[in-house]
Image (spheres, grey):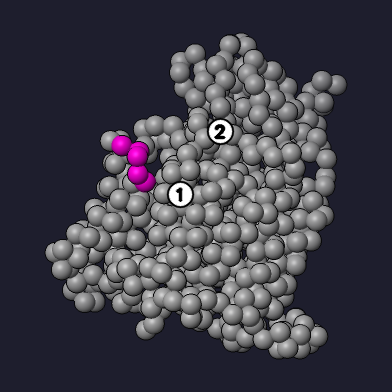
Amino acid sequence: PTMTMVNLPLLLLLLLLSLYPSSSWAFSAPPYRSSPVTISGGRVCSAVTKSGQRQQFFSSVLPKRFYPAVHRNNYSFHTTALSSALQLNAANNNNESTITTNPPTPLQESLAGLTVAFSLLSKAIACSAIVGVNPLVGLWSSVIMGITAPLLGSRSGVISGTAAVVIVPLSGLTMQYGVEYMPLCIILSAVMQGIFGVCNLAKTAELVSEEVLSGFLNGLGFILLFSQAKVFTAAKKVGALVPAVGMASLCFAIVQLLPLVTKVVPSSLVGLVVATGLGMVLKLPLATLESTAPVGTFSGGLSSLPSWIDLGQLKRMVMDFEAVKLVMPAAISIMIIALVETLLAAKVVDDMTGTKDEKGYDVPKRSVLAMSTGNLISAFLGGFGGCGLIPQTVLNIKSGGGGPLSSISYALAMASFVLFFAPWVGKISEAALAGIMITVAYDTVAWSSSLESIKAVMAKGGDGTRVQRLIDLFALGLSSYICYFGNLAVGIIGGVVAQRGLHSIFNRFSSSKDGAAAS
């Protein structure tokens, strides 16, 4: 009930903001020669000054005296491409641009999908354990989401599957009332997602500015980073902390350094194989996926296939108002988080590749409908669905993927792991997987964009633009804090509302002050 009280007002406010004319927020570009980029209902310009310093401005309708001197003198700028927090971070970390100039080959996409499948294995199993169901439930949920998303027109390059951010509110429901309420919760959430798609409300994702996106990525990255601590805590209990840290560090180093030598094979896949293989050769006492999963999880065979839920029980729950009321708070939370992360994952692909997915139809709308359909199918097969995954999407692009084939190959690889190669997959070292996930967490955190927001506040400029940069930095910090310590959905919506509200107040105050001065 508390979650419903928090999410419903924020969701309604976000919908109102999306329907409110963007011009009323008084965002406009400053009068200098640079190509502004439309984003989030306002205009953001990122440019390089004559001194070579990159500056970024969120400008408003202000008198000319409020602009920095460099604007008043109307210097000529060299426009740079607007980069998201994730793109800037990945480019700086790898000393190379992540923008893809050529479409990936089928081999590159297949290998990228295989790498993503390995990285998602332990996560799917862990999510199943958190909810309190068989580990295979998480694996098959990822398979279903991975296949339905590209086939139904989701953004190419986005990886959909089991999501930890979805599991958090779901686990609260199952731990308190039991797993029998899980299908009803996921179905209700999927229906609400479908309504969002049909009513063309996916445009609400455009309200998420670069600062709020950076805050979301910061929170998500640190959640992912510290979630790996359990691997080393368990290793310490059995006296294997040093080997675990060593193999994770080896995997991390390979993932970071191998692309400097060759990109023929995904560095993440090489790191996983080398770290696991070396641990087996040296006979290190490292935990594996098989050793930490229930007996029979990695036995393979047709007995591992999912089965239909009890439709009679589902019908009784749907007709029971108390049951629907019971699961609705979790369903609303899942709906909001899944929508936002799926649409932001598509935005991350746009930023990392420097391209738009032009297919002749509304890609965000189709992405939401594809997610809704995948969640419905997963729920009827006893799964808990998922959404677009930003960390795995990052890994997919960095590993050479980017098309629909990478998502399909990831899903088929996951299915093959369960049916045919389960005994081998069970030998994978959890320390090696932790090394990959630490790499993904490091690449997810918006280091560069966050630092640039701080530098922008410290840079010289007019009082008006300095206040605006302070508002942007506040939105970044607020969304980062709430996403990590609180709720991801509330963090995103709260950041959007705070940033837009403060900008609107400041712009109206400045306009009134300017009008009074003119009179």
Q: Is residue 358 visible?
A: yes
450 up-or-down from 511: above or below: below
What percent of the width, then of the height, locates residue 267? 33, 46
**Residue at (55, 16) in percent of width and height:** 78
Label 2 residue SS: loop
What percent of the width, then of the height, locates residue 387? 60, 60
All told, the count of numbered labels is: 2
Residue 110 shows which numbered tag? 1
Q: Taking 154 as reference, is 102 left or right? A: left
Toward the viewer: 302 or 291? 302
The type of residue carrying mark 1 is Ser
Alpha-carbon neighbours of circle 1 within 10 Å: few (<14), some, or many (≥20)?
A: many
Give the farthest residue toward the right. Answer: 519
Q: Quadrant of residue 427?
A: bottom left
**Residue at (64, 39) in percent of width and height:** 357
Residue 420 shows which numbered tag? none
| The magenta segment | 262-266
Mark 2 and mark 1 in contact (Cβ < 8 Å)?
no
**Residue at (65, 64) in percent of width and height:** 374
Toward the viewer: 225 or 468? 225
Q: If the image is split into quadrants, where does the C terminus sit?
A: top right
453 up-or-down from 475: above or below: above
Residue 354 shows which numbered tag? 2
Q: Between disc 1 and disc 2, whose residue precedes?
A: 1
Label the magenta part by its dominant secondary structure: loop
Q: Is residue 123 visible?
A: no
User: Magenta includes 141?
Assistant: no
The type of residue carrying mark 2 is Gly
318 up-or-down from 475: above or below: below
